[in-house]
Image (spheres, coloured by chain):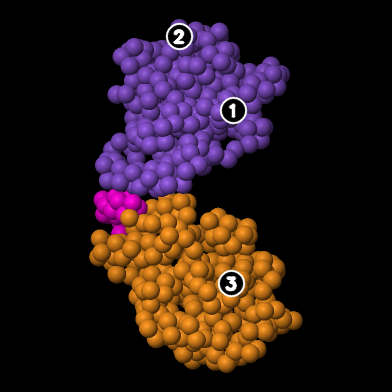
Chain colours: A purple, B orange
Amino acid sequence: MKTYLDCLPCFLQQTLRAGRIATDDEKIIKQLLDDVGMMLKDIPLDNTPPETGMLIYQKISQITGNQDPFKKIKKENIDKALSLYPEMKKLVDKSNDKLLTAIKLAIAGNVIDFGVNREFDIEKEIAEAVNKKLVLKDYEDFKDVLCKAKEILYIGDNAGEAVFDKILIEQLKKPVVYVVRGHPVINDVTFQDAVSIGIDKLARVISSGTPAPGTILKTCNPDFIKLFKSADMVISKGQGNYEGLSGEKRPIFFLLKVKCPVIARDIGVDTSAIVLKRNGI
Amino acid sequence: MKTYLDCLPCFLQQTLRAGRIATDDEKIIKQLLDDVGMMLKDIPLDNTPPETGMLIYQKISQITGNQDPFKKIKKENIDKALSLYPEMKKLVDKSNDKLLTAIKLAIAGNVIDFGVNREFDIEKEIAEAVNKKLVLKDYEDFKDVLCKAKEILYIGDNAGEAVFDKILIEQLKKPVVYVVRGHPVINDVTFQDAVSIGIDKLARVISSGTPAPGTILKTCNPDFIKLFKSADMVISKGQGNYEGLSGEKRPIFFLLKVKCPVIARDIGVDTSAIVLKRNGI
């Protein structure tokens, strides 16, 4: 997805939010906003938003000296999500369509996103997601491709959300490669996070190598790129991965909770929709 | 009021909104956002927000070549407000406390603000304002000062809102000097707007001379400054004037609809409160 004009003020908003998490020093945050303000002129609208996100979060680490400002928040999110895990498992077990319920839960978990929006209520989100219809009707297609696939490449997004991904991985009933970011960025899932959740017990966990808050192939390592190109089925979670991969030609199933009007417009759905969307082949 | 860190992303958001009203050319709007992004580093947090607003809207006029992008919108707002005028007059006439109802209506009109928020429902706002309690309890004080004042300096804000100001001016029952901006900026009221509404029939209309979307004394003309310092009573409408004048030592009655969390925090009220607040003496 290209960068829309609306993304530019949002980059400043994200800088402010993340800057406040990284430091209490107002002068340093002002410096950050000044620096990101000056960066805007160098952002072509052809870039995907996570390419800019990567530069912003690198700038935040560099100026505040804090390499992982969201570490504590991620731990809290993971603990919260793990505490909900048994209840979610029950929800899946008692549902008529276990796979569909697991997909909805995996999307509900996508609300744990500090890049776009810091405020969310995960329990409310779960209740809503389970009762809400998926906006796009690619579920039948999802089942067909899943049925034929030997191995699934599952690209994770946020750290707490990865607990919800576990629920879905358990329902896929196929070998899964779970993809994490190469470095801590916002509250995105890293190798260490995935292992702390126990995803390594269910799937082979690999890093895409990207330091961006989204999968931008040119920032990924060759092993991941090879897997991405050859995988029978690719599941991509969240906005950052959608923004990075929506222009790719290979089939991808995007699972996301829409959290901003720009993405809503790009996909053609309402803001706050829960979306299962397959891109073109 | 000083500039808060939250104001910086908001400046970009305002640039985008106003840029889209001034031109359809996406490249020009990107240029505007780039330029305003670069300006951020030169904005000291000690400045009031309308000082920066002034620079931004001058930049918009300069780059788009459109000196009054909101002209058409202002005309629509004024026409809409004038169509509501007879009904508002009736509301005042049948109320127990005519002055209080007129104050509430004057504040309701303050929602017509394209700087902060483009979306509003003026009829809903009127109904709410009339039934809503003023958040700050300076009404008794307002009546006392009004009773003793020989002349009132009334600083207007937005153009459509000026129709609502007419309702209040009629209830003040004292000579009023109505103050407009020196140049078109956002949808703020200018001399021409005030005359088109007929305020010149009720009050002496003068320009503060400021090209800013708020009253910043150092950008005003000497005649206005003299009047401001010597006036028996000053009524200031809206956020922009509050931001510019809240640090002044003389007593001022601020009438405004709070439209952003920064102002809400500065005043100590909820966002969307309707406020009558007297500053310190």
Q: Position of residue A213 (x, y in %)?
A: 41, 29
Magenta stretch bounds: B22-41
**Mark sitting on residue A151:** 2
* Magenta portion: prevailing SS class: helix
Q: Residue A257: within the magenta?
A: no
Q: Quadrant of the C terminus of chain B?
A: bottom right
Respond whether the residues carrying marks 3 and 1 are from the same subunit: no
Secondary structure found at label 2: loop
Residue found at x 43% / y 60%: B46
Mark 1 or mark 2, whichever is nearer to me:
1
Q: Front-most of B197 and A270?
A: B197
Secondary structure found at label 3: loop
Question: Does B153 sit above or below residue A4?
Answer: below
Q: CA distance from mark 3 to mark 2?
A: 68 Å
Which chain's residue wears label 3? B
Question: Does A36 sit above or below residue B217?
Answer: above
Q: CA distance from mark 3 to mark 1?
A: 44 Å
- The residue where tag 3 is placed is B279
Tell whether A23 sits left or right of A99. Answer: left
Tell whether B232 sits left or right of B114. Answer: right
